[in-house]
Image (cartoon, rainbow, N blue to C red):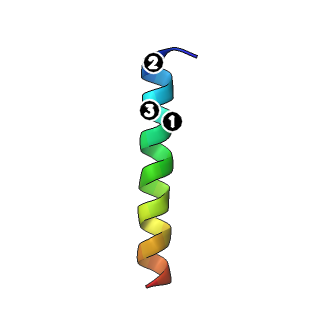
Amino acid sequence: MDYFGANLTISIWLLIGRVQTTWVK
């Protein structure tokens, strides 16, 4: 996997994590 793809995947996971945290609160 190239760097751009990995960085994009991490960004998406971080975004999902933020959304889930917001929903939990």
Q: Is residue 14 above or below residue 19?
A: above
Q: Residues within 10 Å of mark 1 (few under 14, many from 20)?
A: few
Residue marked by disc 2: 3
What amino acid is found at the position of numbered circle 2 in the picture?
Tyr
Question: Mark 1 and mark 3 in contact (Cβ < 8 Å)?
Answer: yes
Q: Is residue 14 above or below residue 24?
A: above
What amino acid is found at the position of numbered circle 1 in the picture?
Thr
How far is disc 1 from disc 2 in space, using C-alphas?
10 Å
Residue marked by disc 1: 9
Give the percent coordinates (x, y) of residue 23.
Answer: 47, 78
How far is disc 3 from disc 1 in space, using C-alphas?
4 Å
Residue marked by disc 3: 8
Residue at disc 1, secondary structure: helix
Quadrant location of residue 8? top left
Give the percent coordinates (x, y) of residue 20.
Answer: 50, 69
Q: Residues within 10 Å of mark 3 (few under 14, many from 20)?
A: few
Quadrant (top left/top right/bottom left/bottom right) for the C terminus: bottom left
How far is disc 3 from disc 2 in space, using C-alphas?
8 Å
Relative placement, left or right, of 1 versus 19 is: right
Q: Earlier in the sequence, mark 3 or mark 2?
A: 2
Q: Residue at x 41, y 63 (%)?
A: 18
Residue at disc 3, secondary structure: helix
